[in-house]
Image: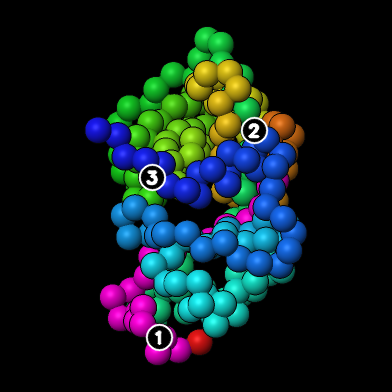
Amino acid sequence: MRSAPHPLLAHFLAAAEGRFPPADGRVTVLPPLPGGLECSVAFTGHAVVATALDARQVADGGADGYGGSLDPRFLLRLAGPDGWIGVTDATLTARATGGPPRLGPLPGLDDHPRVRFARSQRTRVTVHGDGRGLVTLAHGLAGRHELSVELHDTRPDGRGHGRTLLHDALTLLPAGTPVFAAVAPGNARSLRAFLAAGFTPVGSEVVLRPGQSRSSGPGTPP
């Protein structure tokens, strides 16, 4: 029997349709993600936090819809002193184009760093690509369809390879399927490639894994 999707998925799918939470400065608190993960997602003027902490504890930590949900002090509160905190990424989305797949599978890359990272946080990871680079396609945050890319050659004369690789990656799912990517804003070359391929920014996000020493009780320090 299939489990119900995590409620965060509905927020991502709505954002892909151009429908966002009200820009009221508030925070929506949802249950934690599967696999021991939690996250803080910022939309314009509204945040969504998936955590085992309750709404009062989230508010006491300084989270709000105007940037407080991504404040390092709040993220440290979520993770605890021995937790893991990922980087802050821009959340981008596009629609799959379908049609005959333009990228074939790439076997034998289980030890590639990007593939290992994808499998540490995502499920149903498949690897595709060609001479330009590789693409991981997976069920990512809250079960959304998520992809990432890595070029084999990042020299300036390879300009445009990222954009064309992304265009081809969008053929790997049925036409109209919302596809998401998390891109570090400082990775300007990657961000430009995603934007040029038709991806649209809808928010930003941080994924974390709380440590065992985090208290979830009322006495949790700020």
| Boundaries of the magenta span | 201-221
Horizontal side of residue 17 vs 57, given as left or right? right
Q: Position of residue 66 (x, y in %)?
A: 71, 69
Horizontal side of residue 183 vs 76, given as left or right? right
Towards the viewer: 222 or 25: 25
Horizontal side of residue 95 vs 214, given as left or right? right
Residue at 58 percent of width and 47 percent of height: 11
Q: Position of residue 182 (x, y in %)?
A: 57, 48
The image quadrant that residue 95 belongs to is top right
Tag 1 or tag 3, which sits nearer the N-term? 3
Residue at 42 percent of width and 59 percent of height: 31
Towards the viewer: 164 or 208: 208
Looking at the rendered structure, the secondary structure element under dot 2 is: strand
Looking at the rendered structure, the secondary structure element under dot 3 is: loop
The image quadrant that residue 97 belongs to is top right
Q: Is residue 139 visible?
A: yes
Is 189 rendered above or below residue 134? below
In 3D space, how far apart are the residues under numbered discs 2 and 3 (Cα atoms)? 19 Å
For badge 2, the amino acid type reads Ala
Give the residue at mark 2: 94
Q: Is residue 27 magenta?
A: no
Tag 1 or tag 2, which sits nearer the N-term? 2
Within-10-Å neighbours for mark 2: few <14, some 14–19, many 20+:
many
Give the residue at mark 1: 218
Looking at the rendered structure, the secondary structure element under dot 1 is: loop
In 3D space, how far apart are the residues under numbered discs 2 and 1 (Cα atoms)? 41 Å
Task: Please name which of the two marks, 2 or 1, marks the residue nearer to the observer.
Answer: 1
Within-10-Å neighbours for mark 3: few <14, some 14–19, many 20+:
many
Is 44 rendered above or below residue 96? below
Give the residue at mark 3: 122
Q: Are marks 2 and 3 in contact (CB under 8 Å)?
A: no
Within-10-Å neighbours for mark 1: few <14, some 14–19, many 20+:
few
